[in-house]
């Protein structure tokens, strides 16, 4: 009997998917990015979902204007069944006329890039505490930047805007010649020991991931999804699981 893929189902029949950036996200901040000023020293904290990206590939570059930071990274093919590698790229920074970026700290863990951008004043006549920042050229307050924005709940999953090459989808599947199934599911922020997979008595394969809040994250995120249907009595130990860089891959043999 072949293995069947189960399409993602919206968490709410009325509102749609909890987070249109990922059909399997069930709680926590939504969207591909998060921005905030730290309470300690008012540095700008930026969180970017780059699932699959490696620490070695990350490049963070400050533009000559000292206003804009360019971030790029690569997520290599970890399985011969991956459709391709993925390349990410985005820009963030300040769009005020009073400050420039004076220092950048970058961190990569479990498919999430975190930046701390320090700033210094260049116009001492400005007395306000917080400067305006931007993501992909969009200023704070634009629809879709706030992780609690209702724009990130809806019936249609949106492609990842920072993927420059490769799949923009949060998941991909491939039916294997032997009747098996390959699945790649993005769960950015989830450590490899926080993934779990169960096969219930009806043969439904469910994947769960828990991403803890670290650094200045507003809170953690939980992912859960029914992803495949196998014959009743199927031994779940036959499923090959590879969890790495905020991505879980399953090979389900018939």
Image (spheres, rainbow, N blue to C red):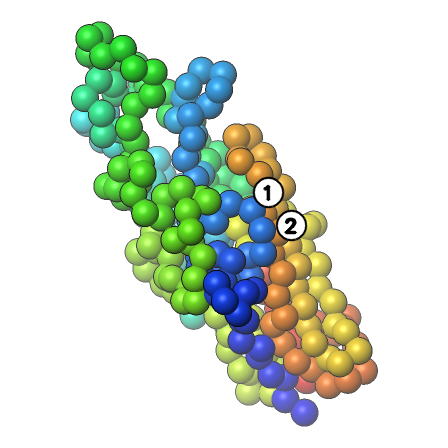
Residue 121 in sight in this render: yes
Whichever of callouts 1 and 2 sits on the residue coming sooner in the sequence is: 2
Q: Secondary structure at mark 2?
A: strand
Q: Secondary structure at mark 1?
A: loop
On screen, 219 above or below 49? Answer: above
Please report contact status of discs 1 and 2: CB closer than 8 Å, yes or no. Answer: yes
For this orientation, the residue located farthest to the bottom is 1
Q: Position of residue 87 (x, y in %)?
A: 36, 54
**Residue with the mark numbered 2:** 210
Quadrant position of the N terminus in the picture: bottom right
User: Which label number is shown at residue 220?
Assistant: 1
Q: Residue at x 53, y 35 (%)?
A: 217
Q: Residue at x 74, y 72 (%)?
A: 199
Describe residue 21's horizontal placement relative to residue 13 as left or right: left
Quadrant position of the C terminus in the picture: bottom right
Q: Position of residue 6 (x, y in %)?
A: 58, 77
Circle 2: is it few (<14), some (14-19), or many (20+) Cα within 10 Å? many
Q: Residue at x 60, y 83 (%)?
A: 4
For this orientation, the residue located farthest to the top is 124
């Amino acid at each position: 009997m072949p293995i069947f893929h189960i399409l993602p189902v919206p968490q709410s029949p009325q509102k749609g998917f909890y987070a249109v950036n990922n059909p399997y996200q069930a709680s926590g901040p939504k969207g591909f990015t998060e921005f905030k000023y730290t309470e300690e020293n008012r540095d700008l904290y930026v969180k970017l979902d780059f699932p699959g990206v490696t620490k070695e590939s990350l490049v963070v570059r400050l533009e000559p204007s000292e206003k804009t930071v360019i971030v790029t990274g690569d997520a290599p093919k970890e399985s011969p069944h991956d459709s391709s590698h993925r390349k990410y790229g985005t820009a963030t920074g300040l769009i005020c006329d009073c400050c420039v970026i004076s220092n950048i700290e970058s961190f990569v863990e479990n498919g999430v890039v975190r930046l701390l951008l320090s700033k210094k004043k260049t116009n001492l006549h400005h007395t306000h505490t917080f400067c305006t920042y931007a993501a992909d050229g969009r200023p704070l307050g634009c629809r879709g930047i706030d992780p609690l924005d209702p724009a990130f709940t809806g019936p249609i999953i949106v492609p990842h805007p920072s993927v420059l090459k490769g799949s923009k989808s949060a998941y991909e599947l491939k039916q294997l010649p032997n009747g098996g199934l390959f699945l790649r599911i993005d769960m950015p922020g989830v450590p490899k020991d926080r993934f779990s997979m169960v096969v219930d008595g009806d043969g439904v394969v469910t994947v769960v991931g828990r991403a803890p809040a670290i650094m200045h994250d507003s809170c953690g995120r939980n992912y859960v999804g029914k992803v495949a249907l196998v014959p009743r009595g199927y031994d779940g130990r036959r499923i090959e699981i590879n969890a790495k860089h905020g991505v879980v891959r399953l090979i389900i043999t018939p």
